[in-house]
Each structure stands twice: as structure tokens, then as C-alpha cells.
Image (cartoon, helix red, strand yellow):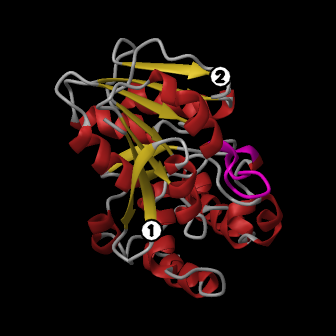
């Protein structure tokens, strides 16, 4: 079997479950054979060893069982950076890159970022990778997720003196430094909606998805607790679910914040920014 034979076979199989079977088939090949995307084309006629055929077949079967391809490969691209992820860790998603964009722009020179519900640490690592002048603290209750956060920080050369990774419930955490910007991609799926999510999402940790009966549980904590740790110039930028954006905005306005909802390229309200009233 050649590389291209497997690619075609995998594409046909993945058509039943994937919106982009070609991309996923090539991603599995790139991961298993340690190839670039160009190499997949250049080496398409090369024969695969029996060991590589077995590895690719097992990976394809896992994907056909609806395991996320990010877990199979153990990594994914986020903000142009390689980020490690796996079971016990929320998968970095393109929509979350809006928070990175915002924090990079909003942080003052030498500023401090607080990343609540950090998961894989992808937001904090991406921000610090692009802003070598700033520091950050990244907080999550899951030790499993923070294993990936530490691995991502180390891989991208983010030292411990720049990024403090803390295992704590955000309800209990007390910042060691007043942040200039708080970012968070908290759990925001309504509890009753979780069983109806795609099978791939069901692989992800329940605690990283469950935002309580109304999806607002973690926003309420951030609005109530963290307002006391802000400067007048501080800002909070949070990813929000498409169906709760207005509710999150109203929640923070009720705590005397000024709010702004930012839309993504599809016109979906994706980020809520809350600023202190001056």
C-alpha cells in the first residue's frame, strides 16, 4: 500500500463523520509519518511499511469511533503554534484565538495576564509567545489539563518566572499580582445540553464543558470575585457561547462593568469584554 492509497481509503471512510475528510486523512498521515503537508504530496507514491499501515489503520479506526483527531495526534495548531492536548484537556479551538488577539493588544508594556480555566494553557502560552515583555498566571482545577499546560509552556520556551501555572478552583484562587487583563474560556455549555453534543465533544472532560443549568456559573464567579482584584484600567475578556452572550453581558453590567460583545468572522458574538467603570 502506498501513502496515497491509504489517503484515498481514509478519505472515503471519513466522509461519513467529517466535514473535511481530506484534511483529517492527511493530518493522520502527517502525524504517523512525521511529514509536512508538502511531503504528503511529494511522497504519495512511496510504499508504507507494515508497521506504519498498522499504526495508521489503528488511528483511523479510533477516529471512526468518533474520538477527536486532536486526541489521536496528541497535538493541534493554535494561533500558529503547536499545542499538545489529550484526554482530560479541552481541545484548543480556532474561535478561542480571539482572546489571544485581544490580550496581545490590550496588555500594557510589562503587563500581567490572568488566565482563568486555562486548560491546556494555550491562551496564556500564545499571548506570552507574542508578548515577551509580559507575565501571566494560568489557573485550572484539573491537574490532568495542567500537565499539558506545563508541557506547552516548556515546548515554547516560556519560563516559570513568566508563567505561573496554578492548580486551583477559581472560586478559591487569590491572584498574587493585580492583572491588567483577565482572559477566560470557562465551561459554558448548559448542563442539559451536554448529552446532545457531538460524540467527539463527549470525549472531552465534563468539567471543562459544564457551565451549570444556565451556562453562566463561571461567569458569575468571575464577575463577583475578581472585580476586587482589578485596577480601574483592567479588562476582562471571556469567550461566550452563542446563546448566552447577551446574558453574560447583562451579568457584568449588573456588577457595574461596561461591556462590549465582539463578533467573529461568521458574525457570531464570541467574546464579551468587561471594563471597570472609571
Residue drawn at point x = 27 percent, y = 34 percent = 129
| Label 1 crowd (10 A; few <14 / some 14-19 / many >=20) | many
Q: Which of disc 1 and disc 2 is earlier in sequence?
A: 2
**How busy is the neighbourhood of tag 2: few (under 14 within 10 Å), some, or many (20 plus)?**
some
Between the residue at mark 2 and the residue at mark 1, the CA separation in whole angstroms equals: 29 Å
Report whether residue 208 is seen.
Answer: yes
Q: Where residue 139 sits: x, y (%)?
A: 55, 27
Q: Position of residue 80 (x, y in %)?
A: 30, 52
Task: Point out residue 5 in the picture as x, y percentages from the top left corner.
Answer: 50, 81
Which residue matches tag 2? 168
Read off the magenta span.
207-218
Q: Position of residue 53 (x, y in %)?
A: 59, 65
Identify which residue, 62 or 219, lies in the foreground: 219
Residue 117 seen anywhere in this rendered image of the structure: no
Picture layout, residue 179 above or below residue 81 = above
Taking 118 as reference, is 97 above or below it? below
Q: Do the residues labelled 2 and 1 touch (CB within 8 Å)?
A: no
- 181 displayed left or right of 141: left
Query: Judging from the image, what secondary structure is the residue with disc 2 in?
Result: loop
Decide whether the magenta segment is chiefly helix, strand or loop.
loop
Give above or below for 128 relative to 43: above
User: In the figure, residue 60 lies in which quadrant?
Assistant: bottom right
Helix, strand or loop at label 1? It is strand
Q: In this orientation, which residue lies closer to the viewer: 124 or 169?
A: 169
Residue beneath the point at 48% across and 36% down: 121
Disc on res. 269: 1
Residue closest to the eye, 252 or 212: 252
Closer-to-camera residue (55/176): 176
* Position of the C terminus by quadrant: top left
The numbered disc on residue 163 is none
Residue drawn at x 70%, y 73% is 64
Q: Which of the two marks, 2 or 1, is nearer to us in this view?
A: 1
Amino acid at each position: 500500500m502506498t501513502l496515497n492509497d491509504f489517503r484515498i481509503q481514509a478519505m472515503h471512510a471519513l466522509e461519513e463523520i467529517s466535514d473535511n475528510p481530506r484534511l483529517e486523512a492527511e493530518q493522520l498521515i502527517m502525524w504517523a509519518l512525521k511529514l509536512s503537508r508538502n511531503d504528503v504530496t511529494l511522497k504519495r507514491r512511496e510504499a508504507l511499511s507494515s508497521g506504519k499501515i498498522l499504526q495508521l489503520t489503528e488511528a483511523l479506526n479510533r477516529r471512526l469511533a468518533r474520538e477527536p483527531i486532536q486526541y489521536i495526534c496528541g497535538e493541534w495548531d493554535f494561533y500558529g503554534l503547536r499545542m499538545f492536548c489529550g484526554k482530560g484537556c479541552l481541545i484548543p479551538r480556532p474561535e478561542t484565538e480571539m482572546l489571544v488577539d485581544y490580550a496581545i493588544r490590550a496588555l500594557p508594556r510589562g503587563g500581567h495576564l490572568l488566565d482563568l480555566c486555562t486548560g491546556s494553557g494555550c491562551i496564556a502560552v500564545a499571548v506570552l509567545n507574542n508578548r515577551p515583555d509580559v507575565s501571566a498566571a494560568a489557573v485550572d482545577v484539573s491537574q490532568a489539563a495542567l500537565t499539558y499546560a506545563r508541557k506547552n509552556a516548556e515546548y515554547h520556551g516560556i519560563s516559570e518566572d513568566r508563567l505561573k501555572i496554578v492548580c486551583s478552583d477559581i472560586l478559591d484562587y487569590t491572584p498574587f499580582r493585580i492583572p491588567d487583563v483577565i482572559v477566560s474560556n470557562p465551561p459554558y455549555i448548559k448542563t442539559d445540553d451536554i448529552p446532545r453534543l457531538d460524540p467527539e465533544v463527549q470525549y472531552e472532560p465534563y468539567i471543562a464543558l459544564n457551565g451549570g443549568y444556565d451556562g453562566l456559573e463561571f461567569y458569575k464567579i468571575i464577575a463577583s470575585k475578581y472585580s476586587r482584584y482589578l485596577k480601574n484600567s483592567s479588562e476582562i475578556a471571556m469567550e461566550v457561547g452563542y446563546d448566552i452572550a447577551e446574558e453574560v453581558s447583562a451579568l457584568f453590567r449588573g456588577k457595574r462593568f461596561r461591556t462590549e460583545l465582539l463578533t467573529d468572522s461568521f458574525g457570531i458574538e464570541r467574546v464579551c469584554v468587561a471594563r471597570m467603570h472609571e
